[in-house]
Image: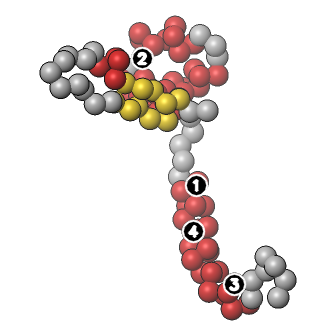
Amino acid sequence: MARGTISLGEWLAAREPLQDRLAAAKAAAGTTRRPSAAAKLLGRPGAVREAWPALDHQSRREILDAVLARVVVGPANRGRWTPTAERVTLEWCV
């Protein structure tokens, strides 16, 4: 058999789980929401900074969800107060 090919039996064994994954992905893609008005601010330079004070909590959260991959809070040092800002790392979406 040629390198990189699979037999009919191997394909048939893998086919059903792959079809299940494809169906689940299609279902998830069909239920995604359109970007909110707050998230649309991201397309205009300076718009988020300008609008931020007037945005509600949900709109701010949507913007942060769109631009932050995760927030990592490092451990505190025992016996020494460490400001939270020094222990927080923001990982931005690329």
Q: Amino acid at mark 2?
A: Leu
Q: Earlier in the sequence, mark 4 or mark 2?
A: 4
**Lower sequence index among marks 1 and 3:** 3
Residue mark closest to the camera, 1 vs 3:
3
The reply to whether residue 32 is in sight is yes
- Quarter of the figure that contains the N terminus: bottom right
* Residue behind mark 1: 30
Identify the residue position indicated by label 4 in the image.
21
What is the spatial separation of the Cα atoms under label 4 and label 2, in whole angstroms?
A: 38 Å
Q: CA distance from mark 3 to mark 2?
A: 52 Å
Residue at the far right: name it: 2
The residue that mark 3 highlights is: 11
Q: Nearer the viewer, mark 3 or mark 2?
A: 3
What is the CA distance from the residue labelled 4 to the residue labelled 3?
15 Å
The label shown at residue 65 is: none
- Mark closest to the chain's N terminus, 4 or 1: 4
Asked if residue 24 lies left or right of residue 75, the reply is: right
Q: Choose between 31 and 9: the one closer to the eye.
A: 9
- Which of marks 2 and 1 precedes in the sequence? 1
Nearest the eye: 54 or 10: 10
Q: What is the x, y in percent for residue 45?
A: 64, 13
Q: Residue at x 45, y 26 (%)?
A: 90
Measure how far apart labels 1 and 2 are at the Cα level: 28 Å
The residue shown at (38%, 20%) is 56
Q: Point out the image quarter for the C terminus.
A: top right
Residue in the image at 54% along x and 47% along y: 32
State whether residue 58 is above or below residue 53.
below
- Callout 4–callout 3 Cβ contact below 8 Å: no
Q: How many marks?
A: 4
The residue beneath circle 2 is: 55
